[in-house]
Amino acid sequence: MSLKQKTITGLVWTFIQQFSVQLIGVGMTIMLARMLMPAEFGLIAMLGIVIAIGNSLLDSGLASSLIRSKDLTQADYSTVFFFNLIGSLLMYGLVYLIAPIVAIFYHQAVLSMVLRVYAIDFILNAFFSIQNARLTKEMNFKLQMKIQVPSVLAGGIIGLLLASSGYGVWSLVWMNLCQSLFSTVLHWIYSRWRPSWIFDYACFKRHFHFGYKMTLSGLLEIIFKNIYVLIIGRSYPLAQLGFYSRADSVSQLPVSNITVVINKVTYPMFSSIADDEHKLKAVYRKLMQQVLFWNTPALVLLAIIAEPFFAFLLTEKWLPAVPYFQILCLAGIMYPLHSYNLNILKVKGRSDLILQLEFIKKGICIAGIVAVIPFGIYGLLYFQLLFSFLGYYINAIYSGRMISYPIGEQLADMFPVFATSAFAGTLCFLADHLYFKSMQLPHFSRILVDTLFFMVIYLGSSNMMKLPAIDDFKQLILKR
């Protein structure tokens, strides 16, 4: 199978996998949001940074090293497997000890026990991380879908049963743990790989040399991605954090789906053509335009229909989250391109440069957050919006140099999509607020009318302007 065919097949199956998983996950989350209170989601949000840091430390970037490396042996895979497994046990022990400190920090006594149970996820994830990395390296996303979909479905059903029985925040904890357990079992059933009793120090050193820089970069990203949760959780009522976390998670649906799909496909694909700069730039450019073409209008539309969307899906008790959601939607436009740019540096083996960039960006982030804290939660949100564009700009400067694709050329390629989305969004916003809203349509009808109106304008304008993404999509997917 050619690289083009392999990439298209990978994209299709990864989209199917990701959107199937998210469709089930969203459905489960909607039902849970109707049963539970915002404060209970706020409690889980408080634990996000601890869990994310733990998972990042466990992997230590070794999975990324396995995916990019060639001529791997059983010793490579087994070494990383046992490192992850032993590390997960040590990490769980550490989190168990610090759980009371986390509870004191947030002034929520229940968090101590919740965190101690939730952290079992570290151990479960360690048991299937290598099988999952092998599937990604092989671009076998069809099998990954067969594993993820039933795992998410089973975990969600258990969470719903517990929520309906009055278990509150524990329903969210056990939903996640059961999902990881099912995923572990299915990875071992479907994957032919089994670890050998090998720990090769030379293999470990080689992968760790690349991976530890990726881990430090990832840790910085995790800390600063969750710093808003830390500030809001510490300084505002628990329900306020619940509104913010729900707004953030819903706004991330198109963002995270596209980011995960693009990362899973482009990283192994870029690795295979890393030495061909001309080809790498051409592929990078086409995929960047596709990402923006679909991600930008989706988020603009979500920001417009936010009020009826939240009222219809989550009930009106979640309406205070709407203004947060609208700002976060706009902030998410550039997010997939952040990691997309970093994949170029990864395949070039420049994990050292990635780490340097993270220090630069986070230094700017700290200064910005300190400056906007006096302006309250909206100051934090608007800074998050500004920083999403600034962070992309910094990443793109360096990745662009690697493939002779300067930032000015990238921005010129992006502008038509931004202009078309802004045009369609402005007309849709005016039509909604001046006409559709005054008709007092039911929430679902208003969502449907706004969506159809927006898509007709956006797709019609894109065709009239002959955006390259339209032609590339027809050639790559529709084959015409």
Image (cartoon, rainbow, N blue to C red):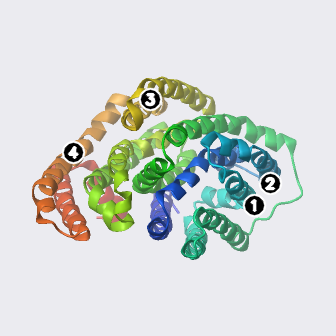
Name the residue beneath numbered marker 2: 85
In three-dimensional space, the C-alpha distance between marks 4 and 3, rounded to whole angstroms, equals 29 Å
Q: Position of residue 96 (x, y in %)?
A: 77, 49
Q: Is residue 207 above or below residue 193?
A: above
- Do the residues under discs 2 and 1 have CB atoms within 8 angstroms? yes
Dot label at residue 127 = 1
Q: Is residue 358 above or below residue 434?
A: above
In three-dimensional space, the C-alpha distance between marks 1 and 4, rounded to whole angstroms, equals 46 Å
Q: Amino acid at mark 4?
A: Ala
In three-dimensional space, the C-alpha distance between marks 2 and 1, rounded to whole angstroms, equals 7 Å
Q: Is residue 96 visible?
A: yes
Name the residue beneath numbered marker 4: 422
Dot label at residue 373 = 3
Residue at x 48% of width, y 33% of height: 399
- Do the residues under discs 1 and 3 have CB atoms within 8 angstroms? no
Mark 2 or mark 1, earlier in chain: 2
Mark 3 or mark 2, earlier in chain: 2
Q: Position of residue 447 (x, y in %)?
A: 24, 64
Other-residue count near label 1 (Cα within 10 Å), few / some / many at <14 / 14–19 / ≥20: many
Residue 193, picture quadrant: bottom right
Q: Amino acid at mark 2?
A: Leu
Side of 103 where 333 appears, left or right: left
Q: Position of residue 199 (x, y in %)?
A: 87, 49
In three-dimensional space, the C-alpha distance between marks 4 and 2, rounded to whole angstroms, equals 48 Å
